[in-house]
Image: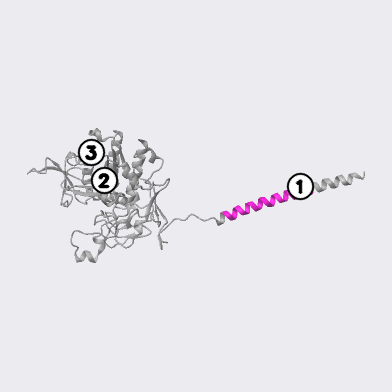
Amino acid sequence: MAKKPHHLAFHWAWGLRAHFNSLIAIVAVFALILTLSLTAINAPKPVLSTPRNSSSIEKTISAPKPVLSTLRNSSSTEKCNLFSGRWVYDDSSTHPLYSGLLCPYIHDEIGCDKYGRNDTSYQKWKWQPNQCNLPSFNSTKLLERLRDKRMVFVGDSLNRNQWVSMVCLLESSIPVYEKSMNYNGSTLSFNAKKYNATVDFYWAPLLLESNCDDPVKHRVSNRMFRAGAVETHARHYANADILIFNSYLWWKKPRMKMKILHGSFDDKVQVYDEVEMIKGFEIALKTWSQWLQDNVRLHKKELYFMSLSPTHAWGESLGEDSFQNCYNETQPIRNVNYNGRGQDFDIMQIAGSVINQLQRKGVNIQFLNITHLSEFRKDGHPSIYRKFWDTLSEEQLANPSSYSDCTHWCLPGVPDVWNELLYAHIFSKHAEE
């Protein structure tokens, strides 16, 4: 009987120790939870870089989905729509991708730095797709890809704008003695000697033979192209390995009709039809398309068609702010639903339909939809910061917006992004080979 209290005391002590250990475990778990909570609270938050003193502008600018979403892209870009995204300000040393003052090939109509534009924030915006990142532009890698090849941009002054951008992106990595530029009529040719690579521009604003074909004196009171005349221009670029086409700007002249010539420009009596501009565009594009189909040797080349480059030449009410045109604009449009008068959906739809038909016929062509992402960049045009070939009147000088160039693009600038998108497609194709 004397051992019973001792037995009870043992169980009581063991139970107390068990409760004490449980209490310690609870306190430890609580302390761990508290520590993790404090860590999460004090962790650094992700920061989106924006221009200094730009609190009035959104940190990122979203773009709507491409209107031509049915167009087929290469397999790698099907997983990520490169054209759906936002503009993000990048204050790092990576942007701009080259110096506008150091690239010797920038033309005077797009050399905004040279002609006194001091706000350079327009050079710092990069395009960020929603679901992936654009590959970094590697000039040496692209030059290696172009070794013993010819790349040609065919079209109007906006395609020339993109060509100059491409040349500036490439030339900075090439020593002076290993590169050259040749001007020969409608063809501008940049040569990287070490790689035996050429990057050319060929002037053909209507794609077919026309009365606008002089690369310098092409301002005419009426516009006319010769029916079926693709070969006139095509013989100058058909041997290229990579071709980038565009044709929009010259079809958007208000209140002007297009003449379609049956015969030759040398005929004393010219026989022609007169159609609305958009009908002329459709006829010309289908003629060009049929020529591509008929020339089987071109089917396996890398072909690209650039969508319309938007202008910002008209006043728009954006709800949150407004502007007359691009003059004095230094920030992108922040209205994510913005659709201005600078794009033409009917022309875009015709182009999309023609490119889709080419793809179904087995032609290796891609449609690069740069329209929507460029629409937000009212800040990217030369405005008054360029060389003007005509003498400006006193009335114009008193009203700078009246002569501002809101069509072309300053370099460095928006066309660099077009070429980053082109670069991504070129290497996605290369990966499939």
> Where are the magenta residues, as a range?
16-39
Helix, strand, or loop for circle 3?
loop
What kind of residue is marked 2? Answer: Lys
Q: Label 1 near label 3: C-beta < 8 Å?
A: no
Residue appearing at x 41%, y 40% in the figure: 79
Q: To which residue does mark 2 refer?
A: 193
Q: Label 2 near label 3: C-beta < 8 Å?
A: no
* Residue 32 lies in the magenta stretch: yes
Task: Find residue 18 and name its label.
Answer: 1
Earlier in the chain: of badge 3 and badge 1, it is 1
Numbered disc in front, either 3 or 2: 2
For marks 3 and 2, give the CA distance.
Answer: 19 Å
* Residue 155 lies in the magenta stretch: no
Q: Say which quadrant the C terminus sits in.
A: top left
- The outermost residue toward the front is 177
Measured as percent of width and height from the top left, residue 383 is found at 27, 59
For marks 3 and 1, give the CA distance.
Answer: 87 Å
Q: To which residue does mark 3 refer?
A: 239
